[in-house]
Amino acid sequence: MVREHSSSISAIDDNDATAAELAAFAAANPENVASVVETESGETGVISMSSAHMRQMFTRFSELIMVDCTHKTNRYNYQLCTFMVMNEYGEGMVVQHSLIESNGDWHMDQAVLHFKRANPNRTKSLRVIMVDKDMNEIRVLQSHFPEARVLICHFHVIKWLKEARTKPEYGGTKLAEEDASAVDSAVYRMVYAQSQEGYDAMHTILRDLCERVGIKLFADYFDRNWHNCQDMWVSHRRAKLPHFKNNTNNRLENWFGKLKKGVDGCTSMAACMKELISLDRVVANEYKYRHNRVGGNQNKFLDQELKDVLRFNTHFVADQIAPQYTAGLAKADSYLFAECDQDSGVVLVHGRKNTRRLQVFDWSCDCEFAKTMQLPCRHAIAYRKHKSLPGSVIPLMRIDERWTSQSVHLNRVRQFEYHPFDEEENSRARKKPRTHSQRYREAVRATHLIASELADIDDETEFEASLQFLLNQWRNVRQRKRTAVDDKAHAPVELSQSHSLWSEGLGDVPISEPQPISFSHPSTLSTSSQIFISAEPSEFRPSEIATIKLERRKPAVALRKSKSEGSGVSDSDSSETGGCISDGNNSSGGEDSRSDPSVNKPTLKIRLNPKAKKSGRPKKNRDATVASERANRVWFDAAQEGRHQAGEVTLLSLIDSLDREKPGLLELQRRLAGVLVKYADFARKKPQFRTLHNPLLKMDVFYVLPQKLLDKCSEVLPLTNTSSDPVVIDGDDDLPTVHELKARKDVDVVYIKDIGLYSRKQIETMQRVSILKKDAADGLLLAKWILEDALPVLPADCHHLAKVISDQVLDNYPATTINGLGDISAYNYRMLYRATPPTWLNGAFIQALCVRLEVDFPSAFFGGMISANPRSKSSKKGSKLTAKHVNNAYDVDTKILQRVKRLAIENGVDTMFFPVNFDDAHWCGIVVKVQAKRVIFYDPLNDAIYKSTLENIAWSIKRRALPGYEVTALNNPIQFDLYSCGVFVCWMFIRQAVQGAPH
């Protein structure tokens, strides 16, 4: 209710109420300093306030200030620019408030000028200024404080670069979420780089990443605008500055959050200023109470050394020294201490990574903690502990006086200043004339203001008259003519007031009777005007408000010159005695000016701009994104380590490099270990095949999906049908031609919910990587199995051969062909990995065995691979195979039958091998013994269904190729597990080919 009532005040009343609040602020304490600056349009552009408590805080803690602006503190869209320092408790303390019309160079310049005026001497001690990414603030602050380093808040750097990355001109709108998070993570690591080498490495990664994902323009923008100003935002560049671990403006942002509990975008300016003043008063009282209370700081969990520190310092200081104290005691014996040859007062402290320079006279060090916190560091504590120096291990003299000293002396400065707009000075400052685009923007802004006012006119007649007047003015402007200005517009304006601000007891204008107070206005927009400043009697009592005499800048200088010439008092002495605000007792000309009615009393004029430009944007919900961003950074770091371990930056280049270099299994496994498995919790997702036009693919994929999910993706992808070799169905004349296929831009992709889109090439590349990872693991298991399981059961004379085979398996790439089996790519070391239990042998392994038997035994030949489906038994149990069953036997491939016929009549042929595979689930075998005229079939499981099908195949070979042969079943050895069928078939082939082979 109070806020609604305060916000319901009209603009004219708010002007007067704001002036009253400002005058009351100045009258409350002679050390309070305020200023008001007028804009070109005669409106108030900047209102600045610095209370006595604020000035005391900056006098004590002047090494660092944090500067930031916030919006939605008043209904006039004026931004609140706040300056803050950090006190000895580690808390942020506001040292200035400036309400500015807009965040421009001129407005910021006026706020800084007030800051320098309120703190004339201590600004020279300023070393660090923390700001956000606003270039206006940086430019103005650098010009006013050339000796200070302007640092950009890390949070705002990351936020700004993230927003720049999303801009269309840099290609950010065509970026997948995963790739965008990788770019943001690279920027984050650059911001917090701890060395120049780390920054350079991450900068290279960022450029390569931007090229891979297609936003090279963003990398160019970064190099152009950010790479050359690393001193302002990179962590290691600010490590030696006294920023007291303030790398962000979080303390200031936190204070803004507390302020906005009492103000918002609908609050009047007077209520906003009242809230600012009351908050400062509360903080000042709390700070005074903490200093004046009886007693000291205690912490029973600290040892005596830290208790001595806490006795004269705050808990914040003790908490900062405690980790350094612990580390110094722990590393006192591990550090190496050596005297510097160039300087006898310097000790070199050699650590595991770095070497620090320690000054033994004042115990200062060049480490980051000592420079940024102005406190004793672990190197000084370790050295004193190592040398067993007398006194405290913690050098208490190293604690800077900012943490302990409480004496404050404020210089007397002019308490209030009102700066009207100086058109001549502003025109001189404007060196370059406006361009056409700049003039156009200014004109558009002016016409928009006029249009807004016209739209608020409800009277149709008045609206038409005003519109016609503007059209007439447009014609005059078009003809380069200017109309005469009515003098009535510049006549003094009298505002009826119920009360006056000036104290009745001090002889000023009576409170009970409103009187106009006129003064000369030097602005070119208007002549003198008569303005009242009023306040409610309940808010300002005459006995509590001192006389406030407001002077213009130029008349004040002339007045001081005349006084100094007449009385011999210098200008500096005049400013020290109170300036243009006095308490009414020490004013030399107070009575004369009050008794002489011809002397105009200067007054405070506030004219707020109701059309100030809005700033800011709707607040985003960051709670849902902080956790994901942190997880993305962890994954980004793991991916970069994986790239470094793999030696390549993309999966495709890694596969090509491995195929070209053909490393051994140990090196292969080491490099492939850098490729991690991502989205392991999404293995049960169901991928969908889609054909999209310019899909938003993930371009920086350096991981593999879970094998189960990869297999599903491969299943949903159709067979490859390229435009250069299309699959054409006979009789289908409606298929597109090759040129039509080339003209299309549709891409085959796999969509996985909650993950994203992947192209066919990406899925195939991940499959290849997964296969290689599995091959490396299987190969190492094979080498281990040979040495640990196979070697003990072999004869002693075969142990050396087993070790040689194990070494060959370890030293060869999985795709390397095996010598002695011909130049066939399928006969490689990869197939040997299938021999390790419990692995199922593949067709290449069994076929390679048959080829090797052909080479070693000229009478043995490989007949061919037969694929079959298991069938039920053709007859009842106990019945014999009849001619009907023979006629319905399994049909064997014609090519195999022709090969059987040809080999059966050749000389020297005794054995033919036919591996039989059932649905990629079971291996059986058929052997043809030519000399014995016998067809032998063998099932390791001795299962009736498999044996029945094998018998049909054997009878088919007999009937169609070998009519004079007999069919015989082999019933041993028998398999008792689920995976050794291929091994048993190989043993059976060896026994049939090698005469006298053991059973």
Image (cartoon, rainbow, N blue to C red):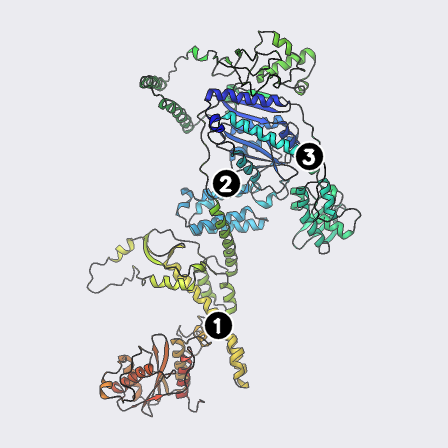
- Report helix, strand or loop for mark 3: helix
Q: Earlier in the sequence, mark 1 or mark 2?
A: 2
Disc 3 vs disc 1: Cβ atoms closer than 8 Å?
no
- Report helix, strand or loop for mark 2: helix
Residue 240 horizontal side relative to residue 968, left or right:
right
Q: Earlier in the sequence, mark 3 or mark 1?
A: 3
Disc 1: which residue: 779
Amino acid on which disc 1 is placed: Gly
Q: Quadrant of the C terminus?
A: bottom left
Distance in Å between CA atoms under marks 3 and 1: 73 Å
Q: How many numbered discs, if any? A: 3
* Mark 1 nearby-residue class (10 Å; few <14, some 14–19, many ≥20): many
Q: Position of residue 41 (x, y in %)?
A: 47, 21
- Report helix, strand or loop for mark 1: helix
Using the image as rendered, state which of residue 48 and residue 8 is in the foreground: 8
Query: Compared to 803, does 653 lie above or below?
Result: above
Amino acid on which disc 2 is placed: Asn
Distance in Å between CA atoms under marks 1 and 2: 52 Å
Query: Compared to 65, does 394 lie above or below?
Result: below
Disc 2: which residue: 225
Disc 3: which residue: 291
Q: Position of residue 338 (x, y in %)?
A: 74, 52
